[in-house]
Image (cartoon, rainbow, N blue to C red):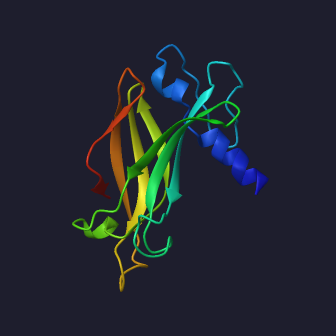
């Protein structure tokens, strides 16, 4: 489990890395990012289920987000970032874990899984969504696409 946490930390895109054009830190798997004061905020995307979602969490779920400080305290809760879409079969019921990929200093991609409802609940798909980072540290997400 510790190795998985280290891997996640090394793969995590920090907000400062995403938003600060003067920082050009490159990390590779199994190589943690340098500990610098500039790398003090993180974008966290996580799977959540709630009372407002119908059904049990493993059948209905969405992806929430938060901005975290270096000590992992929450600076800003973003609420639901990606939600199921009943009109889009591949992500009509539940959303699954994903991964962020920084393309350049103001563009990132979020790859994540999704699935329809019963009886196709276990038919999982992978999609992606492009995000454009604005100067005020907000991200404009384009419509998700199926891979």
Residue furthest top as drawn: 22
Q: At which x and y percent is residue 65?
A: 49, 45
Viewer-side residue, 131 vs 76: 76
Is residue 32 positioned above or below 24 on the image? below
In the picture, which quadrant includes the N terminus? bottom right
Is residue 85 positioned above or below 24 on the image? below
Viewer-side residue, 96 vs 145: 96
Residue under the image location 70 percent in, 26 percent down: 34
Residue furthest right as drawn: 2
Viewer-side residue, 145 vs 96: 96
Q: At which x and y percent is residue 119?
A: 36, 86
Residue under the image location 50 percent in, 49 percent down: 99
When asked about the image quadrant of residue 109, the answer is top left
In the picture, which quadrant includes the C terminus? bottom left
Q: At which x and y percent is residue 57?
A: 50, 70
Is residue 76 positioned above or below 92 on the image? above
Residue furthest left as drawn: 87
Is residue 66 positioned above or below 4 on the image? above
> In the figure, is residue 71 to the left or right of 86?
right
Residue under the image location 42 percent in, 26 percent down: 137
> In the figure, is residue 40 to the left or right of 56?
right
> In the figure, is residue 125 to the left or right of 12?
left
Residue furthest bottom as drawn: 119
Q: At which x and y percent is residue 33?
A: 67, 31
Residue under the image location 31 percent in, 68 percent down: 92
């Amino acid at each position: 489990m510790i190795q998985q946490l280290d891997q996640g930390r090394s793969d995590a895109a920090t907000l400062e890395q995403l938003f600060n054009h003067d920082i050009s830190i490159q990390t590779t798997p199994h190589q943690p990012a340098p500990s610098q004061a500039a790398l003090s905020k993180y974008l966290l995307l996580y799977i959540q289920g709630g009372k407002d979602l119908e059904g049990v969490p493993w059948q209905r779920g969405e992806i929430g987000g938060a901005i975290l400080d270096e000590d992992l305290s929450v600076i800003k809760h973003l609420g639901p970032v990606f939600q199921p879409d009943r009109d889009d079969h591949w992500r009509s019921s539940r959303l699954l874990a994903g991964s962020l990929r920084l393309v350049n200093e103001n563009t990132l991609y979020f790859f994540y899984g999704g699935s329809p409802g019963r009886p196709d609940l276990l038919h999982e798909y992978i999609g992606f969504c492009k995000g454009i980072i604005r100067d005020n540290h907000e991200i404009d997400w384009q419509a998700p696409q199926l891979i």
